[in-house]
Image (cartoon, rainbow, N blue to C red):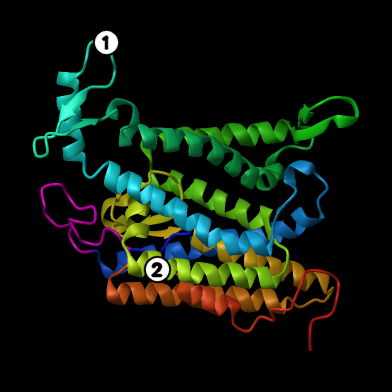
Amino acid sequence: MDSALSDPHNGSAEAGGPANGKTRPPSTPEGIALAYGSLLLMALLPIFFGALRSVRCARGKNASDMPETITSRDAARFPIVASCALLGLYLFFKVYFPNKSYTDSVLKTWKTQKSKKGKTAVIQNPTTRDSHRFPFEIFSQEYINLLLSMYFFVLGILALSHTISPFMNKFFPVNFPNRQYQLLFTQGSGENKEEIINYEFDTKDLVCLGLSSIVGVWYLLRKHWIANNLFGLAFSLNGVELLHLNNVSTGCILLGGLFIYDVFWVFGTNVMVTVAKSFEAPIKLVFPQDLLEKGLEADNFAMLGLGDVVIPGIFIALLLRFDISLKKNTHTYFYTSFAAYIFGLGLTIFIMHIFKHAQSLQYLHIYNICGINAGITEGPRSPSP
């Protein structure tokens, strides 16, 4: 899900301040600079290393690491699908659960009036006297977020394990007993047999999986911002590495559609920011602006959605693969688009800081597209004159 860069907790009680209505103390200039600089660095790292790993991924023969190719049709449909998903989440969090105090009062009333035989009670609306059914005990926001946490707990462990595996291989001794394993799941028999899952791994991968599980348990129990960022960086790097565009025209369609998507959902409505703050999952990178004052227990965050890292990242990775296909020592297209990303993200942070409002990364999309030949496709051919 694409998301906006925002500063949701900058001295505002409405945007996450204390429940007693007192505003948070304003962030210091040093804390703000540290937060913005850290977000910028965290956005660049998965794009740079993910682009490098995407080159090896495109050349790899392991079925478990084969990239997913995004076509022009997929790129055109993505903003529509993302909009439907975003609006659905917004309606779920904002309408179905208007606020915690209301939900708690309904729960209390429902429990006192609950039928002994059934698990769904009828509550009389004091205004309209209409009867409504509230299965809150099953579908409360707390339980939904717990379910989402478990889902991203599993995905995060797998993503983080895949991310750290190449780095961890350097720390294993030469005589480490490394056994090979294969997880194979097929459908049918004989000539009609079809592979559904074919995943190859070894003992070193199992060790990485164990280390990633420790981070996963930490995130599940504490929801700490460092654990959130570890998962977020892993998701971003895996997305840039494994999601491949088939050509630059597809990338331009995708970024152009998301330009409109970002502008509408961030500036036209408050949907994007509401979902980002209500959705308890590692779908964003966060960094505290009060780290210097409170240390690791800081809670005044600026955030950057993973979509604003992955989507431009797969476009930049495409240009790196094209540069390498030219078999030249220069990576002109890659460095140009990477510099455009840095400029666009820096400009977005500056605008957000000046106007104190969440910003879509529209500048990022524009500068990634500008100056790039839309006729470039991957393959060993010379660039257009």
- Measured as percent of width and height from the top left, residue 112 is found at 15, 19
Residue at the far top in the pictured view: 117
Q: Within the magenta stretch, is there residue 19?
A: yes
Query: In the image, what residue type sits under mark 2?
Result: Phe
- Which label was assigned to residue 117? 1
Q: What stretch is highlighted in magenta?
A: 7-26
The residue located at (80%, 44%) in the rendering is 62
Nearest the viewer among 236 and 92 is 92
Q: Which residue is drawn at 54% across and 33% down?
A: 213
User: Looking at the picture, does residue 362 appear above or below residue 236?
Assistant: below
Q: Dot 2 surroundings within 10 Å: few (below 14), some, or many (20 or more)? A: some
**Which residue is at the front of the view, 247 or 157?**
247
Is 322 part of what is drawn in magenta?
A: no
Above or below: residue 362 compared with residue 201: below
| Quadrant in the rendering for residue 191 | top right
Magenta residues: mostly which secondary structure?
A: loop
- Find the residue positioned furthest to the bottom: 385
Q: Quadrant of residue 63?
A: top right
Q: Can residue 376 be seen in this view?
A: yes
Q: Which residue is drawn at 28% across and 48% down?
A: 94
| Mark 1 residue type | Lys
SS label for mark 1: loop
Disc 2 secondary structure class: helix
